[in-house]
Image (cartoon, rainbow, N blue to C red):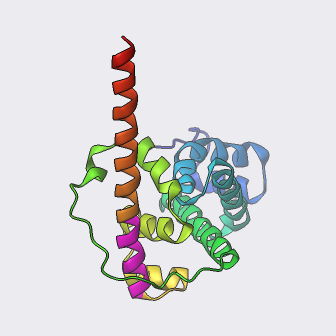
Amino acid sequence: MKHVLDIHYSESDFILACINKESWALKKIYEDYYPSMYPVCLRYANCDADALDILHDGFIKIYKNLDKYQVNTSLGAWIKRIMVNTSIDYYRRESRRRTSHLDGVLGVSNNDPDVLSKINSEELLECLQELTPAYRSVFNLYIVEGYSHKEIASLLGISESTSRSNLVKARTKLREYLFKKVRYIKEEYSLYKRKK
């Protein structure tokens, strides 16, 4: 999504207006980037309410740190990085609340067909939200954001082997959720056909 500034303002003037907390400028950033950043936050969150909390925390960080933005670089990429980092902070807070240890099984595999390539984004998002925060965060950082396991380990405070294990487990769980979803849809369709 391309974001366009009013012709009367250069990017540096716009950023300066944001730094000076001019309400029109802060509102413009929020309105322009909310639609594209909400899905980023939702990928890491347990539910819509958590995604909104992450999003709003992210915008607060953006507003506080606009003086660190380098003009003539990608504002959208800078904002997305803050949203991803805010999501990682959310994961860390959530993982401290849990008491279970996740270093468990390595080498989990599944030979079922790749269901993930055959679903739409809404179905995948629903299934992602079923995952534990640990699995969901590693999946997002590795598959969606393109981080390496070494980078993920550093960001989340886990070992590289735990990152790899959590990715395998996330994929396995996603397949299970998707197969259940497909089975449910088939049953509903079958009931519908019988009623006709």
Q: Which residue is located at x 24 percent, y 55 percent?
A: 114
Q: Residue furthest top?
A: 196
Asked if one can make out residue 189 in the rendered structure from this viewpoint, the answer is yes
Give 173 or 88, whichever is nearer the viewer.
Answer: 173
Query: Residue 71: x, y in percent?
Result: 55, 62
Query: Residue 175: x, y in percent?
Result: 34, 56
Asked if one can make out residue 120 in the rendered structure from this viewpoint, the answer is no
Give 169 or 89, whichever is nearer the viewer.
Answer: 169
Q: Which residue is located at x 73 percent, y 60 percent?
A: 60
**Which of the 4 image quadrants contains residue 182?**
top left
Q: Quadrant of the C terminus?
A: top left
Q: Is residue 159 above or below residue 96?
A: below
Overall secondary structure of the magenta stretch? helix
Query: Residue 86: x, y in percent?
Result: 62, 66
Query: Residue 187: x, y in percent?
Result: 37, 33
Q: Is residue 42 left or right of residue 143?
A: right
Residue 88 included in the magenta stretch of the image:
no
**Which of the 4 image quadrants contains residue 189?**
top left
Q: How many marks?
A: 0
Q: Is residue 96 left or right of residue 32?
A: right
Q: Is residue 41 left or right of residue 74?
A: right
Give 35 or 54, whichever is nearer the viewer.
Answer: 54
Q: Is residue 58 above or below residue 123?
A: below
Q: Which residue is located at x 32 percent, y 75 percent?
A: 108
Q: Quadrant of the N terminus?
A: top left
Q: Which residues are magenta?
A: 160-171
Q: Which residue is located at x 63 percent, y 71 percent?
A: 68
